[in-house]
Image (cartoon, helix red, strand yellow):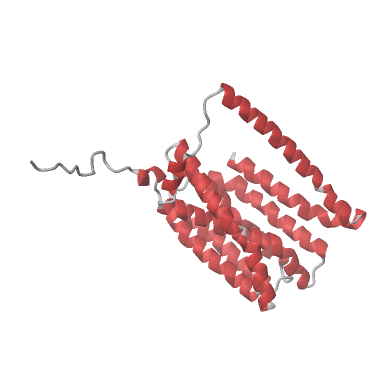
Amino acid sequence: MSTLYITVLQVGTLLPALLAVPVADALGWRSSMVAWVLPALLATAAWALVHANHRRIRATGPAPVTPTPEAEGRVARTALGWSMAVTFGMTSLVTYSMFTWLPTLLREAGASPAFGGTMVALFAALGMVGALTMPALAVRMRNPFPIVLLCAACHLVAFAGLWWAPLAAPVLWVTLLGLGPSTFPLALVLVNQRSRTAAGSAALSGFSQGVGYAVSCLGPFLFGWLHAHSGGWTSPFVFLVICLLVQLAAAWVACRPQFLEDAWTPPARGARALNVPAD
């Protein structure tokens, strides 16, 4: 399911980047914007069907596994929970920053808007490589941290190329840039690999993705703010490199063989001393 989820997510990101400019050139920018109302309506209809089916299952079937507030609170008190949240957050922050600002960067370097859209589409398409290969690869590794190192190396080379000479080899830079976020499907796999129970997996997923996405939404804003205030791309890319270093530190903890439930061991019953008054 993780593979299917990420693949559909990447396709949904690829198509607008690839088609928005050609549709605008052919029919005008208003038609290009209105065209994306249809996918939104289809998604709304799909969610309505899922919601109706979910209510039917809850009425007739067993209760679904959902994280309790107590479980989510215990995740927040574990190193694994925070390391997973930071891994999700930094991966998504870097990815969203590049999705937002890659066309502007290429256009300022002299490329056309259509070329910028094509490169964003390539960036999104390469995300499917990680979605299709990472789950099968990660489950065969006791500690998948070397994968994180390889993804970070792809990011660093891509950042250097886009900063130093963006139009010298843009396809190469964007290809490496697209392989870097393979840590996202890896993190989804780790949610299941680092928990023993369905409740633990649900709690770890909810906490790590909730915190991670809350952090990641700041990425495009901070990247753009640094670009606007510095007048160049050096400061924004330094910011992303710092985020990669934070991601490496968090992933080093998250990738170590361990289970969330092992950090949940409650205190032994009767551990609290009883005060018995003396005669």
Check the image and name the residue furthest to the right: 27
- Residue pictured at 73% horizontal, 69% vertical: 105
Q: Nearer the viewer, residue 192 or 225?
A: 225
Can residue 97 be spotted in the picture? yes
Q: Tell me residue 167's x, y (percent).
A: 74, 70
Image label count: 0
Check the image and name the residue furthest to the bottom: 231
- Residue pictured at 59% horizontal, 47% vertical: 133
Check the image and name the residue furthest to the front: 279
Q: Tell me residue 74's x, y (percent).
A: 41, 46
Work out which quarter of the rendered image holds the N terminus and state it. top right
- Residue pictured at 52% horizontal, 25% vertical: 62
* 145, above or below 223, in the image: above
Q: Tell me residue 255's x, y (percent).
A: 45, 52
- Residue pictured at 79% horizontal, 54% vertical: 18
Q: Nearer the viewer, residue 279 or 196?
A: 279
Q: Nearer the viewer, residue 211 or 2?
A: 211
Q: Answer with the quarter of the image where residue 24 lies.
A: bottom right
Is residue 58 left or right of 77 when viewed as pictured? right
Is residue 95 left or right of 27 when viewed as pictured? left
Q: Nearer the viewer, residue 239 or 222?
A: 222
* 167, above or below 206, in the image: below
Can residue 138 be spotted in the picture? no
* 238, above or below 58, in the image: below
Check the image and name the residue furthest to the left: 279
Q: Answer with the quarter of the image where residue 279 lies.
A: top left
Q: Tell me residue 142's x, y (percent).
A: 43, 48
